[in-house]
Image: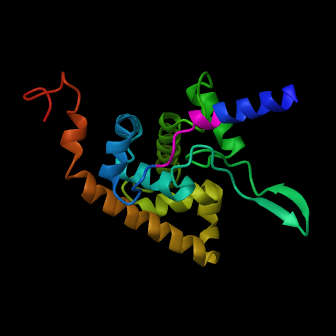
Amino acid sequence: MPKLVFLISVVLFVSSCVTPPPNNQGNLCAVFDQYPKWYDYAAAAQEKWGTPKQTLMAFVKQESSYRSHAKPPFKWFLVIPLGRGSSAKGYAQAQNPVWSEYENERGALFRGRTDMKDALDFIGWYNHRTNKRLGISKWNPKEMYLAYHEGHGGYRSGSYNKKPQLLKVADKVAKTSDAYGTQLATCETRLRCRQWYKFWPFCS
């Protein structure tokens, strides 16, 4: 009985530490208003790697619906669980092999797939490699997403052409990025200059 109480306490504690998804995922201004630090993380990732903030956030929306501990669903054979479809985890749904590459290059200390700051940095890092290896513009969210989903080898081979549903998803990501960009233009100055020490003429 004491062990059960302890386990329940641990589960409740962990649950209380999980950041809930934003209430209005369709409006990037609302997302950043609810979680202002996410704007800072997206801005830092864009400055470091070049992928626009709206595209970074569109990737997160598509991959995890802003759920920090998102994982692929279990696969079943009748009543027998076969495990999850992949090792994808977190906001960016990064899989173990490529996440290990990211950690080796960027440093593993204190990095985690359930942390928005690290997830956005990972997406920016991966898209930067995509740009270097495949020549895809960082301002082309559809093609960037296809390369993100299929991997660089899969993209080169055109594997996505045999996946009509994936092409629809990539179009959806592009539309989300465009909508997010339009929305962000109306609130970015306020978000960027929200701290008390950021004021004209030092912030505009």
Task: Say whether residue 42 is magenta.
Answer: no
Looking at the image, the residue that sits furthest to the left is: 201
Q: State the residue at coordinates (56%, 55%).
A: 63
Question: Residue 68 or 188: which is nearer the viewer?
Answer: 68
Residue 47 in sight in this render: no
Q: Which residues are magenta?
A: 14-21
Q: State the residue at coordinates (56%, 48%).
A: 67
Q: Is residue 106 left or right of residue 197?
A: right
Whole-percent x, y for residue 70 in the image: 63, 49
Q: State the residue at coordinates (88%, 30%).
A: 1
Image quadrant assignment for residue 151: bottom right
* Quarter placement of the C terminus: top left
| Numbered circles on residues, count | 0
The way the protein has been coloured in the rendering is rainbow
Whole-percent x, y for residue 2 in the image: 85, 26
Q: Is residue 1 left or right of residue 98?
A: right
Whole-percent x, y for residue 37 in the image: 38, 34
Image quadrant assignment for residue 101: top right
Question: Residue 49 or 112: which is nearer the viewer?
Answer: 112
Residue 115 in sight in this render: yes
> Eyeballing the image, is 152 above or below 20?
below
> Eyeballing the image, is 103 above or below 53?
above
Task: Say whether residue 16 is magenta.
Answer: yes
Q: Is residue 153 left or right of residue 20?
A: right
Q: Is residue 9 left or right of residue 51?
A: right
Question: Residue 41 or 128: which is nearer the viewer?
Answer: 41
Looking at the image, the residue that sits furthest to the front is: 1
